Amino acid sequence: MRARSIGLVLLIVGIVAFGASLAAMVGRVREFHQQSPPPRFFCKPIIQRTFEFRGRPVSVIDEPTVSAEAGMAAVRFRYGAESRPVPVVAPPAANLPDLGIYSEWLKVLAVRDQPGPGRPDGEERLVLVVRRPPQGLNPLTWGSVKRRLWEFDFYEARPDGTIDQRTFRFPRSFLGERSLRQRAEANESGSSPDAEAAEQFAISPLEERTWEYAAALNVIPALQVPNHRFNNDAIDAMGWTLPVAGFAGLGAVWGAAMVFAGRGRTRLHPAAA
């Protein structure tokens, strides 16, 4: 009988706590979406080598020279009067009619913010994004699997006719980022030389909920997409309500099990006597 009483208390408290935390959770998620609507980006691949954007000619042409690094080549990205050489993993063949042969490592994308509540239709961007394997590693073997060392080059065609170039690195887990920071700080202090960690830490990681992150996904193999870290999203906004709801639900289940187990034993007592 004592076990049944404890179980009944656990069941009632668990149900009440679960209901209260669930109501608070729903309120937090609703408030999050009202105050900070999650951005959504539509990325349209462009495989033509020549076209126009904002009234300026654009072209992506294979460079005749090949990098000294094994397995690497280059294309030249032209936008109006501007042009940039773009290192990229060498395709099986060069000078094909379109860019489809580069799709695993390089893509030209038209990126637009998708409209929604609190999100007006944004300006369209044109960007050439490249996934680069670690320097010195064969891009077809270790270079294709060591994703934490990947870097992403962005060449954006700006409204003023210039090409903006930026580089990001593959995002790591919370513990991975902390370890990289500690190694970089140790290198800076001289206590543990690690130039590679310092160089990587100096490059900003791809951040979730940015158009750069959405664009980079287009050159990342499906099985190697970074794990979602639930930073600055509805899961993060739930705060204390999520663990409380989980423990409350678990407590209610244990309470129900104790109540029903106690009933079974009570019925068996007369027969046993």
Image: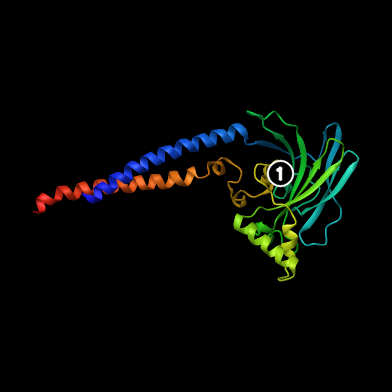
How would you rate the neighbour count of disc 1 (Cα within 10 Å): few for under 14, some for 14-19, many for 20 or more?
A: some
Residue at 53% x, 37% y: name it.
Answer: 28
Q: Quadrant of the C terminus?
A: bottom left
Residue found at the far left of this picture: 273
* Residue position marked by numbered label 1 in the rendering: 212
Measuring from the top left, give residue 103's x and y in whole percent.
Answer: 71, 46
Say how the picture is coloured.
Answer: rainbow
User: Quick one: SS at disc 1?
Assistant: helix
Residue at 66% x, 49% y: name it.
Answer: 220
**Can residue 137 be seen in the rendering of this structure?**
no
**Can residue 249 be seen in the rendering of this structure?**
yes
Q: Nearer the viewer, residue 217 or 267?
A: 267
Residue type at mark 1? Glu
Q: Quadrant of residue 150?
A: bottom right
Measuring from the top left, give residue 179's x and y in whole percent.
Answer: 64, 61
Q: Quadrant of residue 42?
A: top right
The reply, left or right, for residue 57 in relation to residue 16 is right
Measuring from the top left, give residue 71's x and y in whole percent.
Answer: 76, 59
Q: Nearer the viewer, residue 4 or 60?
A: 4
Q: Nearer the viewer, residue 171 or 28?
A: 28
